[in-house]
Amino acid sequence: MASIWNPHFNALSGEYLFVASAKEAKAYRESNPKLPLVSLGIGDVTRPLPQVIVDAIQKAALEMGAPATFRGYPPDGGYPFLREAIARYYRSLGIRLSPDEIFISDGAKSDLGGLLELFGDVPLLLPDPTYPVLRDAALLAGREVWYLPLTAEDGWVPTPEGLPMRPYIIYLCSPNNPTGVAYTKSQLAAWVRYARESGSIILYDAAYGAFASGAVPASIYQMRGSERCAIEIGSFSKMAGFTGMRCGWSILPKALDSKDCSPRALWARRQGSRFNGVGYVISRAAEAALSPQGRMGSAQAIHYYGENLAALRACLDAKGIPYFGGKDAPYLWVKTPHGMSSQEAFRYLLWEHGILVTPGSGFGKAGEGYLRLSAFASHEDTAEAVKRLESLSYPMST
Ligand code: PLP
């Protein structure tokens, strides 16, 4: 008899990547190790919120406690003050958006999966390695997934060269998790051209846009014509230390509308049935994150993580270990030593040296033979990890 439960769960790997590595890290801690664990594993922020955000939270909390200023369900699409603040943020990048093209969310993760519901029976084109959330959402919905395997030779940047001219949902993420590389304007322009010509839609994950140095795009809408073929997903998580606060946004430009369909209207309809919005206190906190003081606080945190990147890069350079990324994104994509598999190198670093990293193979088959190092740790933990990496007795050069 057919099972009553969704059979597509069988297509997923046994455990979500970071749940599996957190379990192994717990086992290490409980083994009473000589070396305390230092984590360059999960990409979670560690810097506290800037004071301007804390003040906004306190003020909004007091408003919620007073009869005249108490608020219930948030308005559809999000509080206008936050949609306007995000439009102003985009204006600072040279992009004109109307607040009603911006939809507030509880973070990029939920929207990445949710946005797939807008599409008909179109395959998802997914670079491999990838942040696994969209892959899992597509597989769970029984959607066809076409992988674009990336390699060191192509610098871990996907290109549309040689793809058939047919519509896809194309997932692009830049600056990229897990490879830490950011796509150049000309690389993105090729994708925009392909999407326009093939009738595809790009789902552009800009969760790390704030880490882009200026030489590379922070948003797909910096590319001419992209408003006709791209939906962008943004997040306060890494930009403003909001992983524990939960707030993000998605942009569905009016330019995507055709005479028979408005994706913006579809998303509004979908959210109306499936999402009850982001609360007032968090929305005020996110607004504060985009104020001049808030943006200065973000820049300081990004600078702090940048110092970790510099320390890790210097260590890898000195040891002659090949790596990618780590300039416009808080991740380094590091070759494993001597043909070790990602899992072997992950276990070796954890159990022999107490350093938690993420195995590249967890981000897709093409990630095999690589490790992802995160720069979100404290300076102290990063310095300790660097010290241990420097003293590795195992020959680390390839
Ligand atoms: N997209 C990418 C590429 C990410 O790395 C992450 C989180 O690590 C997310 C989206 C999810 O972000 P959020 O915290 O906004 O759900």
Image (cartoon, helix red, strand yellow):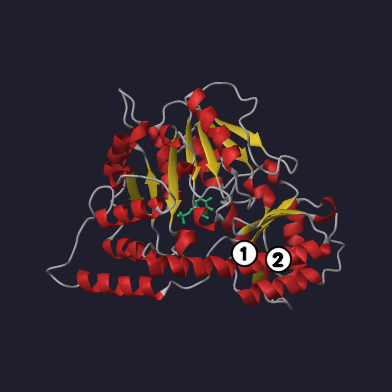
Q: Relative to 148, is 393 on the left or the right?
A: right
Q: Are marks 1 and 2 in contact (CB under 8 Å)?
A: yes
Asked whether mark 2 lies closer than 8 Å to ligand 1, one says: no
Tag 2: amino acid: Leu
Q: For label 2, count other residues whose C-alpha is less than 10 Å away and answer few (under 14), some (14-19) or many (20+).
A: many
Question: In what element is the residue under mark 1?
Answer: loop
**With respect to residue 114, does 28 lie above or below?**
below
**With respect to residue 211, does 383 lie above or below?**
below
Q: Please tell me in which quadrant of the rendered image residue 60 appears.
A: bottom left
Residue 125 at least partly seen: no
Q: Relative to 398, is 369 on the left or the right?
A: left
Q: Distance from label 1 to label 2 (Cα)?
A: 8 Å
Q: Residue at x 26, y 43 (%)?
A: 272
Indicate the position of residue 337 as horizontal and vertical percent values: 82, 56
Q: Outermost residue, left direction? A: 68
Which of 92 and 246 lies nearest the eye of the viewer?
92
Earlier sequence position, callout 1 versus callout 2 = 2
On the image, numbered disc 1 is attached to which residue?
Answer: 375
Question: In what element is the residue under mark 2?
Answer: helix
